Amino acid sequence: MERVALCAELLFLAELSAEDVREKKVSVYKVLVFTVLALIYRAFTNQLFWMEMIINLVPGGMMILLAILTKEGIGYGDGMTVMVLGLWTNVWFTTGVLCVAILLSGIFGSICLIVTKREVIPFVPFLLVGLEVMLFYA
């Protein structure tokens, strides 16, 4: 993976994490901007392979399916964010980031249920931590 793509992902998730913590939602406009940037990046690096890109969208598509099934217990914005991550990298790296994020958010959610009452937990910060874990350990 290219360093430019990883830096763009870190920037993307850092920006969305701050917004998700503050407002408990993700800006569709920012997601679209990073989607266009990912497509431009792939075009300039001659990595614009449609079949590969469709496969890379699968983890995010699964998140959107979960959002539909849980009636937005998991937000659509989280699924769109994971889809954009897939555009920047590949399906396996994105799946690893998603698995780490789900594990960490589950632990955090369990602690919140024990300590306090039920509240909305932003998921994008866990994606940011998952990306950092994958960068350091995978």
Image (cartoon, rainbow, N blue to C red):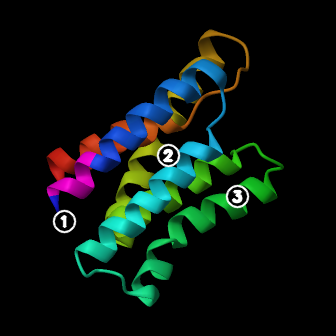
Identity, as a three-letter code, of the amino acid under mark 1: Met
Residue 1 got which mark?
1
**Number of residues whose C-alpha sits closer than 10 Å to that of mark 1, classed few (under 14), some (14–19) or many (20 or more):** few
Which image quadrant is residue 80 in? bottom right
Question: Badge 2, how many Cα within 10 Å: few under 14, some, many 20+?
Answer: some
Of the numbered discs in the image, which one, if any, rests on residue 66?
A: 3
Query: On the image, numbered disc 2 is attached to which residue?
Result: 102
Closer to the chain start, of discs 3 and 1, is 1
**Placement of the N terminus among the 4 image quadrants:** bottom left
Q: Which residues are magenta?
A: 3-7
Q: Which quadrant holds residue 74?
A: top right
Badges 2 and 1: C-beta atoms under 8 Å apart? no
Q: Earlier in the sequence, mark 2 or mark 3?
A: 3
Residue 54 lies, with reference to residue 108, above or below; the image says below
- Residue 64, percent from left and from top: 68, 60
Whether residue 18 sits left or right of residue 94 in the image: it is: right
